[in-house]
Image: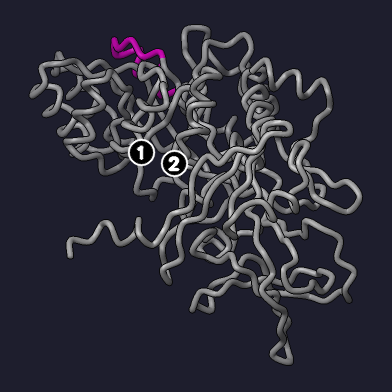
Amino acid sequence: MTTGLKRRTNNIMSFHYKDGYLYCEELKVKDIQEQVPYSPFYLYSLAQLETNYAAYQKALEGLDSIIGYAIKANNNLNLLKRLSALGSGAVLVSGNELKVSLAAGFDLKRTILNGNGKTLEELSLAVEHGVLINIDSEFDLAHIQQTAKHLDKPADVLIRINPDVDPGVHPYVSTGMKNSKFGIRNERLDWFLNEIRKDNLLNLVGVHCHLGSTIKEVRIFRDATEIMVAFMRAIQAEGFSARYLNIGGGLGIDYERTGEEIPTPSDLIDSIRDLLPEDITLIIEPGRSLVGNTSVFVNRVTGVKTNGNKHFIVTDGSMSELIRPSLYDAYQHIQFIEPVDGVAETYDIVGPVCESSDFLGKGRVLPTPYEGTGLVVCDAGAYCHAMSSNYNLKMRPPEYLVDGDSLTCIRRVETLDDYLRVFDV
């Protein structure tokens, strides 16, 4: 963390242009592209990661709190170790994420297991390691009870409640509405309390909600916090020593680059600070807003073509390596890493995968590039490499980390031999 503060004092910018070339901290991205033996690849800035974490620390000053990084956003072990060293907790949605959080050195007492379909094996890992567990349904509660009894170990649990607040985002990433697959039926809260009260191995320690992702209005968090505090007070009135108020994550980032003012972590926390009782520990689960803007996805232009009506820039990157635009119709800013003086045209930026849905961006006005031009998809640190696949037998790309003037490979490229190794032939 000290290193990150020093960088900010020295005004070292994470991604910036100089003389027409894109830099990551002190390194020219074009030089990195020529040095790296594989294309496409992901490129991260350590300074940006440290800056983002420090912003949450500053926002939460004066509050008893846990920053629980959502590992699903980006599960690179090297980045997880960096966040663990900064003091972050972890938010998990699978048993393997729990095992990786152990390998990364996270304090599992500051770790939360979410999910609407947790298996007995995953719950056993969580109970063994003292992880906080969210109750998501009647059967989920039964499975937690079964696990605690089998291990003869107590389990600390929270109840996941849906505040039914519309986050105003893509329906695929809206998770806190009444009809969501996540969370209990709120009208059944008393039933859950009675079941927990009867079980001497379960400790109800708090409540949890998660509204969704890419949220850009802090009033949405405030509305939900008011509702959740009321639920917490009702639970405490029933004799439970609930202390954790988990409001989830979901803060958006500036994907569009239109000049829109995006709320900061301080904006979020300041919007709810006056609602927070003194006797609670606030848990917040940032993923995208911690790692989203730490990375760019670096491609090469394979060629330019037209069908008479539309114009296309074809790149070596595709939906197999970065699926958000194809899956969510999500916008991520695209720009060249070097000077390009060709005629400006409106392009769709597409990859080589055999699907019409394979695109990185549509309708972008860009100068016409030459073959081999470097191109980046910005803000690629969250839900990009983590959602990559082997579709069309594309190999998952490598990841590199810049620290000042130093470049480190933090994940090697997956090879065809790696892929073939899983088959028993």
Above or below, comparing residue 228 to residue 211 in the picture: above
Which residue occupies 81% across, 69% down?
Answer: 366
Q: Residue furthest left?
A: 150
* Residue corresponding to mark 2: 72
Instruction: Please check the rendered image and state whether residue 168 is part of the magenta-colored stretch, yes or no.
Output: no
Q: Residue furthest bottom?
A: 308
Which residue occupies 77% across, 56% down?
Answer: 337
Crowding near pointer 2: few (<14 within 10 Å), some, many (20+)? some
Q: Which residue type does callout 1 highlight?
A: Val
Nearest to N terminus: mark 2 or mark 1: 2
Which residue occupies 45% across, 35% down?
Answer: 77
Secondary element type, mark 2: helix
Question: Range of the magenta residues?
Answer: 230-243
Q: Position of residue 288 (x, y in %)?
A: 57, 40
Q: Mark 1 and mark 2 in contact (Cβ < 8 Å)?
A: yes
* Residue corresponding to mark 1: 93
| Quadrant the N terminus occupies | top right
